[in-house]
Image (tube, rainbow, N blue to C red):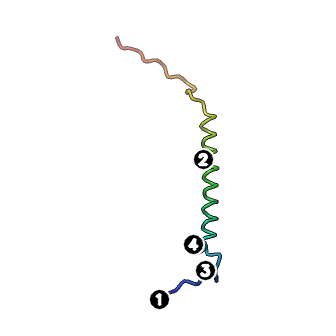
């Protein structure tokens, strides 16, 4: 049966090294935070009312 090498032998394998896993999680969290702040900024800058108003409906009577 195949045995995985010891973690100390290969410290750069990201899925077996918890420090690298933690670093990847932190970098992903930072990226998500940047995207969320961009999204919040875009929503705050966007106009609330539409630029072109819809024409009033004409009654048929």
Mark-to-mark CA distance, 1 and 4: 20 Å
Q: Which mark is residue 40?
A: none
Q: Residue furthest top?
A: 61
Neighbour tally class for label 1: few under 14, some 14-19, many 20 plus, Cα within 10 Å: few
Q: Earlier in the sequence, mark 1 or mark 4?
A: 1
Above or below: residue 10 compared with residue 34: below
Pointer 4 residue: 15
* Residue at x 53%, y 22% (from the top left corner): 53
Above or below: residue 46 compared with residue 11: above
Front disc: 1 or 3: 3
Pointer 2 residue: 36
Q: Residue furthest left?
A: 61
Pointer 1 residue: 1
Residue 11 in the image: state x and y as whole percent. Answer: 65, 77
Mark-to-mark CA distance, 2 and 3: 35 Å
Residue 16 in the image: state x and y as whole percent. Answer: 57, 75
In terms of depth relative to the viewer, which is nearer, 8 or 52? 8
Q: Earlier in the sequence, mark 3 or mark 4?
A: 3
Neighbour tally class for label 3: few under 14, some 14-19, many 20 plus, Cα within 10 Å: few
Mark-to-mark CA distance, 3 and 4: 10 Å
Tag 2 secondary structure: helix
Front disc: 2 or 3: 3
In terms of depth relative to the viewer, which is nearer, 6 or 37? 6
* Residue at x 63%, y 70% (from the top left corner): 19
Pointer 3 residue: 7
């Amino acid at each position: 049966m195949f045995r995985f090498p010891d973690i100390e032998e290969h410290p750069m394998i990201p899925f077996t090294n918890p420090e690298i896993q933690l670093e990847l999680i932190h970098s992903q969290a930072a990226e998500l935070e940047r995207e969320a702040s961009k999204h919040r900024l875009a929503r705050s800058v966007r106009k609330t009312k539409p630029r072109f108003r819809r024409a009033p409906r004409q009654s048929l009577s």
